Amino acid sequence: MLVNVCLNYYYRLLEIASARYGNVYVNEQSLLDMVSKVYVFRERSLQSLVNRLLDSLEDFVVMHNVGLIILDSIASLIRREFNASIRSNIFERNKVLTRQATQLKHLASSFHIPVIITNQITTQFKKPSDVNILHKDNCKVDEDNKCYALDDTTKNESTVLALGTYWTHCVNSRILLQYTEMHTLRELCLVKSSQAPPLKLFYTIDSSGLNIEGYTVLSSYYS
């Protein structure tokens, strides 16, 4: 089951099934039968998403024997309806996140099904003083004691989770997906888990979906 607030999955799912399992889905009807087993709810507002999760989702899981829940993405509607620059909004936003996380954990535990939730990332720009602290060797200090980059290699921006650190404590496992220096090769990093060792897995994506190219076990988790 997919609770989808931002992406259209339909044609991509058909493409993956045809490419990877062409010997199983041999005609159009078999593909349509497969897709019909994926239940999709498109929520256009935060309130409709909350109502779905808290009021009707558990009954639906029981009625249709749901084996997987995907929420894509939890950040999209939250970011649209709560301005994080307003301090009072942070408290209200976290209350909503807590209610959603509690309900999804309940479903995962009660029915022994995995729940996958996607977050988003955003860019955070550092102040000149932050650059001075983090990249002293690549900065110069002017007469006002402000630090400026000596070259373009200094990073004065960073990528952070859209929902901040609060959401990271709401989940049991965190997986980071990102590109490597080779544009076609991506990596999946397990950065938090109570049941699995820290792991970095390399993969590519094509018409057949995700293809694992290799992996390495890490000595410790990192964020």
Image (tube, helix red, strand yellow):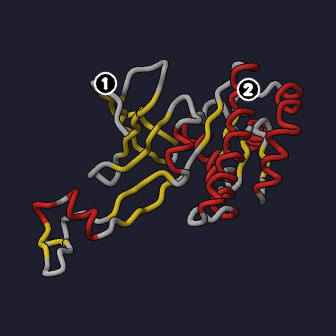
Identify residue for label 2.
Answer: 106
Residue at screen point 36% across, 28% down: 199
Residue at screen point 31% across, 26% down: 220
Q: Pointers 2 and 1 in contact (CB under 8 A)?
A: no
Q: Which of the pair 52/184 is nearer the observer? A: 52
Q: As shown in the figure, which amino acid type bears the numbered disc 1? A: Val
Residue at screen point 42% across, 62% down: 123
Q: Which of the pair 114/126 is nearer the observer? A: 126
Foreground: disc 2 or disc 1:
2
Res 18 → quadrant: top right
Q: Residues within 10 Å of mark 2 (few under 14, many from 20)?
A: few
Residue 56 in picture, x, y percent from top left? 88, 38
Residue 131 in picture, x, y percent from top left? 24, 64
Residue 147 in picture, x, y percent from top left? 19, 71
Identify residue for label 1.
Answer: 217
Residue at screen point 77% across, 45% down: 40
Q: Residues within 10 Å of mark 1 (few under 14, many from 20)?
A: few
Q: Which of the pair 12/74 is nearer the observer? A: 74
193 vs 139, left or right, is right
Q: In which quadrant of the rendered image does the N terminus lie?
A: top right
Residue 120 in picture, x, y percent from top left? 53, 53
